[in-house]
Image (cartoon, rainbow, N blue to C red):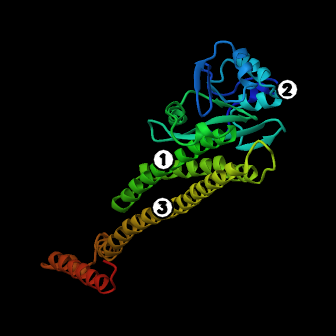
Amino acid sequence: MVKFVKKRSHKSGLPPGSLVSVGDKKSETQIKLMDYDSGHIIEKGLVRVEECIPYKKSRSITWVQVQGLSDVARLVNLGKAMDLHPLIMEDILNTDQRPKIEDFGNYMYVVLKTLAVNGEGEVVSDQVSIILGRNFVVSYEEKPSAVFDKIRERLRQDKGRVRKMGADYLMYTLIDAIVDNYFAVIENVEDQIDRIDEDLISKPTEEALGAINALKREMIFLRKTLWPLRETIQVMVRSDSGLIKEGTKIYLRDIYDHVIQVLDAIESFREILSGMLDAYLSSVSHRLNEVMKVLTIIATVFMPLTFIAGVYGMNFEFMPELGWKYGYPLVLVLMACIVVVMLYKFRQKGWI
């Protein structure tokens, strides 16, 4: 089941800025560095975070990639090396943040959510934090993923314009990769809705009801996750910070359009699922009404028969019909005629 809030109760009472990771503690922290410009590229893994300090002051673009937030000590050292505020480090480690952007003048802090579909068909989310500086970008992933693999490959092969642009364009490509992955998740959800809709048409079951409720919960989760992203991108587009160039804002507006498309799809899915739930309840109610109609007809047919049988089942001494030779078959014929007449009348009225 989708978790709306990650456990933070063990942080209660700690002072502001206390660095405690609440995300996936099983993923080992890996720190990689890519330094590039239009003419060169350097890629290396960092054992000591102090190794990134010289690159911070270079004229080329530096991308520090952090995967896994379990090693708090290394992350603290990296935050000090990049001159990050302790409260920013706290937000990075608290992986249930809503998408947002904060401008600190010499760097920006952006929070987003990646979405994926696990083996059970459920939508899962991880937090990605991005620090944008003058000539560097630091990305923090809650756990290792393949969401940025294509960007790394583009940098290695010098495809596209990313090697020729600044750090703000690199940040755009990271955000664009995350948002593009939303469409794959939305397509998967749409396929699930189509399958459930087919089941409802053929034969509604309790499994279909459970699937509808699960998808409705996922839609609430997706809306909660993505709705603040629209505002975040809008703030970037309207920002007068020198960290984001005017040329990059055009691309950010394109991301904004993509986010709106995803949100529109989510709203449509919510309405479809509500309609499917109503259809399921109507189908169940219709089936119940059909059963009750059959039982009512049977009970109505047997009411006069029960009355006749009850009358002649009384043990009075003087009942002349009891002495008739053809009394028994006549009563049976009378009962049969009553049944035929009643069924004929029911058929005339369209009840059966």
Instruction: Specify whether 263 is left or right of 350.
Output: right
Do tag 3 and tag 1 residues touch (Cβ < 8 Å)? Answer: no
Q: Earlier in the sequence, mark 3 or mark 1?
A: 1
- Viewer-nearest of labels 2 and 1? 1
Residue 349 in view in this figure: yes
Q: Nearer the viewer, residue 187 or 52?
A: 52
Residue 27 in view in this figure: no
The crowding category of the residue bearing disc 3, from other C-alpha atoms within 10 Å (few below 14, some 14 to 19, many at least 20), is: some
Q: Secondary structure at mark 2?
A: loop
Looking at numbered disc 2 in the image, what kind of residue is underneath it?
Answer: Gly
> From what the image shows, is residue 340 above or below residue 14?
below
Instruction: Specify whether 54 is left or right of 283.
Output: right
Name, please, the residue furthest toward the top. Answer: 48
| Label number found at residue 13 | 2
- Name the residue that disc number 1 marks: 184
- Viewer-nearest of labels 3 and 1? 1
The picture places residue 100, in percent across and down from the top left corner, at: 74, 44
The picture places residue 292, in percent across and down from the top left corner, at: 40, 67
Quarter of the image for residue 37 reads top right
Looking at numbered disc 3 in the image, what kind of residue is underneath it?
Answer: Met
Instruction: Specify whether 263 is left or right of 93.
Output: left
Looking at numbered disc 1 in the image, what kind of residue is underneath it?
Answer: Ala
Q: Earlier in the sequence, mark 2 or mark 1?
A: 2
Residue sitting at 52 percent across and 44 percent down? 181
The picture places residue 332, in percent across and down from the top left corner, at: 19, 76
CA separation in Å, label 3 and label 1: 23 Å
Name, please, the residue furthest toward the right. Answer: 15
- Name the residue that disc number 3 marks: 276
Q: Nearer the viewer, residue 110 or 50?
A: 50
